[in-house]
Structure formats: C-alpha cells, structure tokens
Amino acid sequence: MVGILLVVPGIPPVTVSGISFSIAQGSTLNGTPWFGVYSINLSGPASGFPIQVPSGGSVTLTLIIVNQDSAAHSITSVSLNAPFVVKATNPALPMSWDAGEDGIIVVFVQVNAPAGSTVAGSGTISALG
C-alpha cells in the first residue's frame, strides 16, 4: 500500500519509479533466509508505482514481513539511499517476530529530489543487530 501527498499545481512533481530493499539476515538450518526472501522490490502497477509526489513530499510504504525460521528474529533498522530519507516506522524498530509469525512494518519516507526529476530508491532492511 502506498500513500501519496497532493501535488501543488504549477510545480512539477517528483516521479518515484520504485523502491527496493535488500534484507540483511541470517539463514535457517536448511539455508533459506530467515524472512524467506533476500529482497523486496516495490515497482510497477501491482505495487502502486510509479507515483508522483512534490519535492520534499512523503511516501508511505507497507511491508509484510514473514519469519520463516524456527526461531524468533528482529528487524532492527530500515534505511534508504539519497534522495530518500526514512522518517519513521510503525511500529518503531526493533520489532521481533516469533517463529513462523508474520507482521507489517509501515515505513514513512521523505523524497528529497528536485521537482521534475524521476528517481528510484534502494535501501536495506536489517535483521543483524
């Protein structure tokens, strides 16, 4: 789910073509990643992209996380490369998942790109401390 701010008429918006996260995590005993995948890629119409926001505007990302290990694990941080800034998460991190549990992290992101530009974001979700 993606939240969008209104664009002020006369000022060209920033187009966000997508946002991807690599997940820094360990492996289960059989070698699969704790959270089932090594990355989350939000792009294309199925993910609600591209989107347009004003320069300095915000995007809200909803990430579904599933712990596929037989032990509890925590997400300790979420970060993005410039021109994106993670302003907050809900719930606040760190957040733990018991074995087999799923949950949602909402990430509030500020887009500090020049008006009229097209940008894509990349970052890291860390479960390693």
Image (cartoon, rainbow, N blue to C red):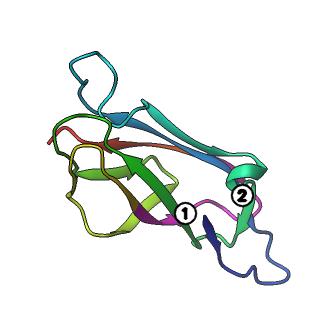
The correct choice, above or below, for 59 with respect to 121 in the image is below
Name the residue located 62 percent from the left edge and 65 percent from the top edge. 2
Counting from the top left corner in percent of width and height, residue 45 is at: 78, 51
Per the image, is 116 magenta?
yes
Counting from the top left corner in percent of width and height, residue 35 is at: 35, 37
Name the residue located 20 percent from the left edge and 58 percent from the top edge. 94
Residue type marked 2: Gly
The correct choice, above or below, for 67 with respect to 76 in the image is above
Give the mark toward the camera: 1 or 2: 2
Q: Nearer the viewer, residue 116 or 95?
A: 95
The correct choice, above or below, for 108 with respect to 65 in the image is below
- Residue with the most extreme top position: 30
Counting from the top left corner in percent of width and height, residue 40 is at: 51, 40
Mark 1 Cα shell of 10 Å, populated few (<14), some (14-19), many (≥20):
some
Mark 1 vs 2: CB contact within 8 A: no
Q: Nearer the viewer, residue 25 or 36?
A: 36
Identify the element where label 1 is drawn: loop
Residue 48 location, quadrant: bottom right
| Residue 48, numbered label | 2
Q: Nearer the viewer, residue 94 or 59?
A: 94
Magenta segment, prevailing SS (helix, strand or loop)? strand
Counting from the top left corner in percent of width and height, residue 110 is at: 50, 67
Residue type marked 1: Asn
Is 33 on the left-hand or right-hand side of 84? Answer: left
Residue 11 location, quadrant: bottom right
Q: How many marks?
A: 2
Q: Which residues are magenta?
A: 105-120
Identify the element where label 2 is drawn: loop
| Residue 112, numbered label | 1
Mark 2 Cα shell of 10 Å, populated few (<14), some (14-19), many (≥20):
some
* Mark 1 vs mark 2, CA separation in Å: 20 Å
User: Where does the N terminus fall, quadrant-wise?
Assistant: bottom right
